[in-house]
Image (tube, coloured by chain):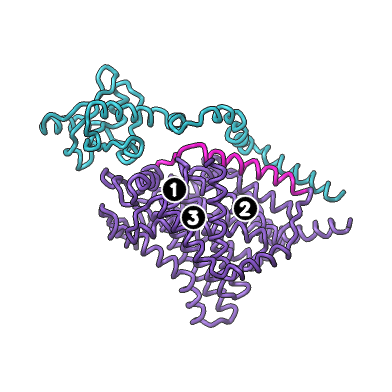
Amino acid sequence: MNYLLIIILVTILQCFTGFGVLTLTRISLKRGIFFPLCLLTGVAVFSIVPFLLQLIYIPITRWSVFISLLVVCIFLNWRLRAGIKRVHEVWRSSKFAIKLYEIPALFVITALVLISVWRCFYWPPTARDLNSGSEAIAEYAVREGTLVNSVFSVDVPINAFKPPSITSLQVIYKLAGFPFGQLWLSTIFISFVVFLYHALREQVHRVFAGLLLIFLLAIPELYGYSFMVLHDYSNAVFFCCALYFLYRFFENQRRNCLLFAALLMSVATYFRSETLMFGFLLLPLIVFNQVKRKMGVARSLYASFLFLFPALLLYIISVPVYINFYLPVPYPISEQINKDLTNLQPFFRRLADMNSELIFSKAGIVYYGYFIFIFLLIFLADVLLIRRINRQAGNWLYAILVVYLGLPLLGHLLPMVDLQSFTKRGLQKIFPLMLMYMGNTQLLIEISKKISRWERKAQ
Amino acid sequence: MRQFILFIASATLITGFFSLKHNRSWLNGRILTYYRELPGQLKQMKEEDRMLTRFGSYYGISQQIAATLKNKSKNSGEALVLMPATAYFKKNGVEYRVPEPVVFYYFTGIRTVWPDSENAKQANWFVYVTNGQIRIARVDNQKSLLDTIAAFNKFETTL
């Protein structure tokens, strides 16, 4: 079978799997967000299936993996009829129309996406952290039929002990016929780009949505990881989507939004286990929002528990349980934790280094382009000109602060976490949040309204 | 007409953004190069060629070492090869960044061990350089292995 046909079949299966999850959680969205989210959720479910097979000791073969994926897809779609009815409504409720002024941005975005997809397909997995962990394990899992394979018979670095999210996806795509796997990253990338564009369009004018998205795509470091597989990009995507649904829950108080946010948060944690700490740092925001809406402290704490429980569960299964009861090589997690937690000097040193070496430096421009400065500019303009940070923008600002302070905090908690690889890549998480903040600022919303009014006058 | 004005505004803003110094060099160096690279890449679709182009000697020399071992030993799957550090190769005139054991295993299916590992003493083959040529030899006895490990450990092992 040729590559194109395989990728289409796998993507359809992913889309239906994600569709099943969205139907079960009764998430109602506009078309532009619904379909990319189906794919993202589908990839998330796929990333768990080979791992589950391993947990119950079923050999990982082409048949076992693809039959399992099919069974999971069918199982999740047991309310298919209701789902199709909803899709029909979603399809009818919004018209697909591209305006003339969207074309420049869409052209640039499409060009960047196509180049990324080709590179993702063409080049072998490159990142050292991947090849010395997930990729090596996936390659031998395909040959030996198990994730616990002969890779563990050589001296393995810490990368071999990460949760098997990427390993599972690599296994699926290698079994599907792609020698380097990887194309699942393009599915995540494209879905996320479409998702962000439509999420931005909900608040600001399409010209701004396109422009802001180009600012994000042109972050060299972030763009590089859209075709070079590693944990951080996917983690950033699911983390941002989790927050999007958490904030929707703040607005509409619908529990399915909270549940879906929690599921996405658990996937983000599955891709990068340290995300659990960011989850804990988000709890004050949940409690604050709920209490502000007079939900009572008990219900606020219950919402916090619901948000974090799936992430905690998946963390326990994929990290301590998997490492201690499945992997043949011991990995003492507790020994990685800083023994002198009360001494906060490493936290402040890391925070200072992060600012001086990564963000406000020449190297920072090379890594992240001008994105942070554009964010700061819009933030200052919003504060000084409008003098009001609306609730949505405030929520995204809080999330930015969580990542900004959370990364140095991780460096403090886990001394092995270094600045030039971990913190540098961890900052990828902050950019989609900055983008969402900018797309929710009162400044851009007001200007967007004026442009739309001016545009309508002509009609 | 107003849509057209917005079209011009959008195109101008995007052009302006990519005219900024670092954005322009990123666009020229990382994105537009794609159109020059693509024809060559389409002609070079074999996995092995793509690996070689991507990793260079990091992959190529590793493959050569593995091929030599497989020629010399019927049980190359049982081999544990003591591998000196990158600095050792450099000192002996060979440009070869040594992959860490798990990456070497991923590339070649051959198990290696670095001299600073506690498993180094279990090696049954070792790699060395003589007259600028990479050689691989079987470990004859434990004493010579310990001497070799000590000699290799004089070079710092780095990723």
**Which residue is label 3 attached to?**
A235
Helix, strand or loop at label 2? It is helix
- The segment highlighted magenta reads A101-128
Residue identifier under label 1? A170
What is the number of the mark on residue B65?
none
Is B28 left, or right, of B61 in this rendering? right
Type of the residue with mark 3:
Asn
Q: Position of residue A36 (x, y in %)?
A: 60, 56
In the rendered image of the structure, the colour used to display chain A is purple
Q: Residues within 10 Å of mark 2 (few under 14, many from 20)?
A: some
| Real-space Cα separation, disc 2 to disc 1, in angstroms | 35 Å
Give the Cα distance between marks 3 and 1: 16 Å
Q: Nearer the viewer, residue A346 or B150?
A: B150
* Tag 2 subunit: A
Label 3 crowd bin: few (<14), some (14–19), many (20+), radius 10 Å: many
Residue A385 visible, this orientation: no
Is the Cβ of the residue at disc 3 closer than 8 Å to that at disc 1? no
Secondary structure category for the residue under label 3: helix
